[in-house]
Amino acid sequence: MQISERIYHIALVEDDGALRTLLTRHLRQSGFPTRGYATAAEFRASTEQYDLIVLDVMLPATSGLDLCRWLRQRSTVPVIFISARSSHTDRIVGLELGADDYLVKPVDPGELVARIRSVLRRSQDAREGEGQDNVSIVRFDGWRMDRRRRELFAPEGPRVSISEAEFDLLGVFVGSPQRVIGRDTLLEHSRNRLPGNESGDRSVDVLVSRLRRKLGSVDGGRELIRTVRGVGYVFTAKVES
Amino acid sequence: MARHSLWPRGFTGRVVVVLVLAVFVQFLAGSILIRTGETHIQRQDQGKRLAEQLLIAERIVKDANPPERMRLLGNLSTIHTRLTLIEGEPAIPPGIDPEALAIANAITEFEPALADHPLRLSLAPGSALDFSRRIEGALAIGDGLWIGFAANEAVVGWRVLLETTLRVGIIALFVLGSAAVLVRTLSAPLRRLSDKAQLIGTADRIPFDEEAGPQELREVSRALNTMQERLEGVITQRTQALMAVGHDLRTPLSRLRLRIDGIAESEDRRAALADITQMTGMLQELLDFFETGESRRAPEPTDLSSLCQTIAEAFGDLGAEVSYEGPDRLVIQGVYDHLARAIENLVDNAVKYGGAAALRLSADPDAGLAAVTVEDRGPGIPGAEIDRMMRPFERLDAARSDRLPGMGLGLSIAANVAEGHGGRLELANRTGGGLRATLLLATK
């Protein structure tokens, strides 16, 4: 779980030279040894092993999407797209190809690092067999959660709106169903997505109550998250993937 | 222009006016021609008959004994013409009435033997009822003797004329009536075309039938189709160009964002970061405007309640006061991202102008509509400006746009989304101040 324990190597494929240099520098300063590549061909020619690939969608000759497809046929290495295109379709295409996240330019450097950490943790959890993090679609009590697209659907299909923080929280719950989860664990997973200026525990409670309300739009939804007084919460539903 | 009052606006009306005028002229000309023709035939006819009678009378009277003459002439009279013997100057004035000239000519033409006899001819008033006139005249047969004659039949009378005029008039009316019906039939496709043409620009593409209706209208249909194609091409090109600019600016903006990271913390650095955030927002606004304006995305069941809650909470987390009131669940057919964008824009406006927002959700099952209402206590919008504010790139005033970043597309995007969801955006000033924006959305 402690991702700071080891060094993660990152490859950045970005055709814009200046941006490549700037991003590489920023990632290195953030503790990730990073190497930049200008084209898909250049990257493919490399024999290096990376822990995560940051891919620009629009690359000359072979696009980032094609490169992602090529990568997916060979490995499960996490991929984060950065793209100048923000439309729903572009995003979905990227995620459907198996990318783990999709960021729209101009990328906020802090946000990029946070997303890299989040994706790395998820892939590490998956490797260690913790939870169902490697599975895209998760079902519980008629609900459907698309972890890749970060979308939640109520029984009978309507899409239910959920904030990023609530989604992460729900992700922790479905990852450890029918087990008591402490507030500190929830807090750790929901870092820098907490609402307002509340103290940590209080923020987790606010998030849980919001999530409960949304799950409560369907009968029995409120009971899916039960409070264990003084400790934390239990996600009561059976989770299928 | 004054003639506008007489000149009908519609195509049918105009054609009918033209037809009425044409038929009237034809009627007049017809009447005159018929009258002239009939008069001519009748006079020729009368002239010939008179000529025959007069020639016979002349020969008989010349050969007969003077006492017998009067009686013989009496015998020669017919129900059409009465003949008398006049000794000395006849009562008829000398010469030939100009209007009876045709008859005189007919007489001498038909019986040239009468040409050297002095002839007097006049048109005497006949019946006072129909203003007809009768021929009277006298033919000199020598020795101071004249054969007087008087026709019993009127020269083309009022009644004859009236009858023919009536007949021609009735025909004219029939022609006019059927023509009006035909014109209406003919103009029906034109009206349909114009009704359809009104819709150009409101939906994707209005197809015009190039295979129906008269040739000219087919050509108009073809022209309209081509025009729409061309317009679409131009618009698509412009949109794509703007979108490409929107996309392409994001890479240099990314560089700028990262470069600023290298600058030491300062007021300028914070301001530069704020500028980048503003530019990013503007680009997103522009792209959203195009995306919501011509969305091809299929609607999916979407819960508006949770959407409104998420938005209210997100604004709340950023320090704005946004309340939510409504059901726990309200599912409509919609495009999630677009709905989110529209509601966010409305709440954002309310927070910007009014400092706080009240977000409410309700459904009207009878109308098949869901209503997302966003209210603020800001300055509102002057009544006359409300329509303008929904148009793209419009802002209430220039001074305010400095303070509030954006491209003025927020309301247009919301309106686009509402229309894309079978509804509309309504703006109204609240009593007591502030603005109420209502996003109406079809539930099915």
Image: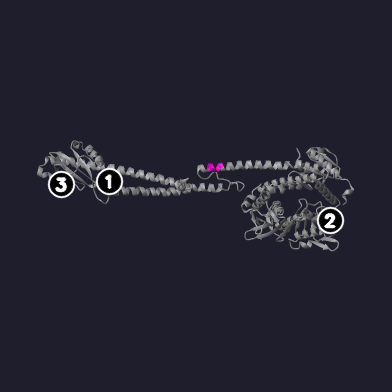
* Nearest to the observer: residue B367 or residue B98: B98
| Disc 3: host chain | B
**B340 horizontally vs B234: left or right:** right
Q: Position of residue A44 (x, y in %)?
A: 81, 39
Q: Which residue is drawn at 62% across and 54% down?
A: B383
Q: Residue B74 carries which label?
A: 3
- Depicted B197 relative to depicted A204: above or below: above
Mark 1 → mark 2, Cα distance in angstroms: 118 Å
Q: Label 3: how many residues lie within 10 Å, few (<14), some (14-19) or many (20+)?
A: some
* Nearest to the observer: residue B434 or residue B197: B434
Q: Is mark 1 on a helix, strand or loop?
A: loop
Q: Which of marks 1 and 3 is in front?
A: 1
Q: Which residue matches tag 2?
A: A187
Bounds of the magenta span? B218-223
Tally the numbered discs: 3
Task: Give the mark nearest the N terminus, 1 or 3.
Answer: 3
Q: Is mark 2 on a helix, strand or loop?
A: helix
Q: Where is residue B374 in the image (x, y as percent from the top left)?
A: 69, 56
**B234 horizontally vs A190: left or right:** left
Whether residue B253 is in magenta: the answer is no
Tell me which amino acid carries mark 1: Val
| Disc 2: host chain | A
Q: Residue B156 carries which label?
A: 1
Q: Which of marks 3 and 2 is in front?
A: 2
Tell me which amino acid carries mark 2: Leu
Q: Where is residue B146 in the image (x, y as percent from the top left)?
A: 15, 41
Residue A73 appearing in the image:
no
Tell me which amino acid carries mark 3: Gly
* Nearest to the observer: residue A85 or residue B359: B359
Q: Where is residue B215 in the image (x, y as percent from the top left)?
A: 51, 42
| Disc 1: host chain | B
